[in-house]
């Protein structure tokens, strides 16, 4: 294999793509689009969207009307008018719904039915949010009339912070599995796994389309007169891989900058308490989200083993891309302009990628479980599974063994794809099946 020709092909594939307006526009607009999505989502959340309600209440119990209300999403107004008239008039008075709270007689009751009236169906988060406001009011009322000392009652509340107390070999504290580090590891692992998932589909598909275009336009017949088919295939894979790496590097710079900018604007314009309440309703999260400050988060981020995470991610990035791009290139060489035929041949390639993405969810929950270990060693899933484990400090022998298997698999799939590519790239007018692809593997060069 001529390295000069391989370099020239890779350079051409790289330069042709990075100079395209579509590449430049997509590279710049993607971070801007993400920032715009964050801003719009935050703005709608701050305004309450469909969750913000103006509510008219007839409180026969007197409990809710006299209670202190802290909700930022719901506005409660009270009326002493008859229920029948309020049911008919609440809409014309500008309210979204009407609540009727019956009289509360027995302080030992643990369940209170409240009727609401509205012409539109409420979402589950709105119903639960209103219920939570009323429940808190009745809870405070029952505490006050029970005679329990408020200080004594508050002393019953207990928060448990589960932190790792294990010592390392030198007797020092191991900060590898505290709550905050696990949260950061979960977010980082999910992000890296998702990036790998997208890279395989986007850039692998780009290689396949490039091969198909040159085959359909008969350009490849001229090119392979001076270069071997396998060299041409590897050059395309390396060139497109460079495009992907360039795009990711630009995104790694732009996306954090856009995120910081959007967060700053949202922090000025939006009410944090309202966002907390909405997030709690939507996700079932506790409304007290101030357990960790920015300094703690940055400190935990610094403690991550970046000397292992970054180089390993780059290796798995290239390894996963190389394996799947080789297979995509082989499929692209075997088909013509019949995309239906291509989809049929692509199906076995897509299955491991989707399976790895599904396995990643369980891996993040249990990064040292049997499924996680298997997925991080099996070469068709390791490019997604192992990056999702890196933030959880997996054993080094598993990381290095996974890399070794991945490198050997790159060589094997490149050889396999090359055997198919050298035959399929000059094959026209024949419907290709898996049986036919198997025969191509044993054709003599």
Image (tube, grey):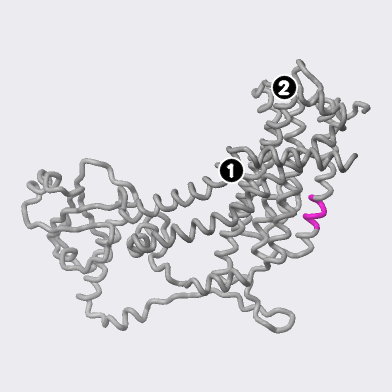
For the residues labelled 2 and 1, the Cα–Cα distance comes to: 25 Å
Mark nearest the camera among 2 and 1 is 1
Q: Quadrant of the N terminus?
A: top right
Residue indicated by mark 2: 217
Circle 2: element type: loop
Magenta segment range? 401-406
Residue 128, image x and y in percent?
Answer: 32, 55
Magenta highlight: main SS: helix
Q: Is residue 276 left or right of residue 291?
A: left
> Mark 1 sits on what residue?
24
Measured as percent of width and height from the top left, residue 209 is found at 68, 31
- Count all numbered tags in the image, as a single digit: 2
Residue 114 among magenta residues: no
Quadrant location, the C terminus: top right
Q: Residues within 10 Å of mark 2 (few under 14, many from 20)?
A: few
Residue 253, picture quadrant: bottom right
Q: Is residue 112 left or right of residue 86?
A: right
Q: Is residue 156 above or below residue 180?
A: below
Q: Residue at x 87, y 26 (%)?
A: 225
Are the residues tagged 2 and 1 within 8 Å (C-beta)? no
Q: Which of the pair 80/442 is nearer the observer? A: 442
What SS does tag 1 mark?
helix
Out of 19 and 159, give the one closest to the viewer.
19
**Between 163 and 13, the one nearer to me in the picture:** 13
Q: Residue at x 65, y 60 (%)?
A: 367
> Mark 1 or mark 2, which is nearer the start of the sequence?
1
Residue 349 to residue 123: above or below: above
Residue 59 in picture, x, y percent from top left: 14, 59
Residue at 75%, 36% (x, y): give it.
Answer: 327
């Amino acid at each position: 294999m001529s390295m000069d020709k391989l370099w020239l092909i890779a350079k051409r594939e790289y330069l042709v793509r990075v100079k395209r307006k579509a590449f430049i526009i997509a590279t710049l607009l993607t971070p801007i689009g993400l920032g715009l999505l964050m801003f719009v989502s935050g703005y709608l959340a701050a305004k309450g969207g469909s969750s913000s309600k103006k509510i008219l209440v007839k409180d026969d119990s007197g409990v809710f009307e006299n209670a202190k209300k802290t909700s930022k999403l719901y506005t409660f107004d009270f009326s002493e008018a008859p229920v029948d008239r309020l049911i008919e008039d609440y809409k014309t008075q500008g309210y979204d719904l009407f609540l009727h709270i019956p009289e509360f007689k027995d302080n030992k009751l643990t369940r209170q039915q409240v009727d609401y009236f509205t012409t539109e169906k409420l979402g589950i988060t709105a119903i639960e949010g209103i219920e939570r406001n009323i429940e808190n009011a009745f809870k405070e009322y029952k505490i006050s009339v029970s005679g329990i000392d408020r200080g004594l009652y508050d002393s019953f509340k207990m928060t448990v912070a589960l932190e790792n107390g294990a010592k390392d070999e030198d007797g020092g504290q191991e900060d590898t599995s505290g709550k905050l580090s696990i949260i950061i590891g979960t977010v980082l692992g999910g992000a890296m796994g998702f990036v790998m998932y997208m890279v395989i589909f986007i850039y692998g598909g780009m290689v396949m389309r490039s091969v198909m275009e040159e085959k359909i336009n008969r350009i490849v017949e001229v090119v392979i007169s001076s270069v071997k088919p396998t060299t041409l295939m590897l050059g395309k894979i390396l060139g497109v891989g460079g495009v992907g790496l360039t795009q990711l590097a630009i995104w790694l710079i732009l996306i954090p900058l856009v995120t910081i900018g959007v967060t700053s604007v949202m922090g000025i314009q939006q009410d944090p308490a309202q966002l907390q309440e909405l997030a709690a309703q939507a996700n079932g999260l506790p409304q007290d989200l101030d357990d960790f400050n920015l300094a703690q988060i940055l400190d935990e981020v610094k403690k991550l083993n970046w000397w292992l995470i970054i180089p390993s991610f780059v290796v798995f990035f290239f390894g996963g891309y190389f394996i799947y791009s080789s297979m995509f290139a082989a499929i692209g060489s075997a088909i013509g302009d019949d995309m239906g035929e291509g989809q049929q041949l692509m199906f076995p390639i897509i299955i491991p990628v989707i399976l790895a993405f599904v396995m990643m969810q369980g891996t993040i929950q249990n990064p040292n479980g049997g499924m996680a270990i298997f997925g991080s060693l099996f070469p068709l899933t390791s490019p997604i599974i192992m990056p999702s484990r890196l933030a959880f400090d997996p054993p080094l022998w598993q990381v290095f063994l996974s890399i070794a298997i991945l490198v050997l698999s790159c060589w094997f799939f490149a050889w396999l794809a090359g055997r198919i590519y050298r035959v399929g790239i000059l094959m026209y007018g024949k419907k290709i099946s898996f049986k036919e692809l198997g025969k191509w593997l044993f054709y003599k060069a």
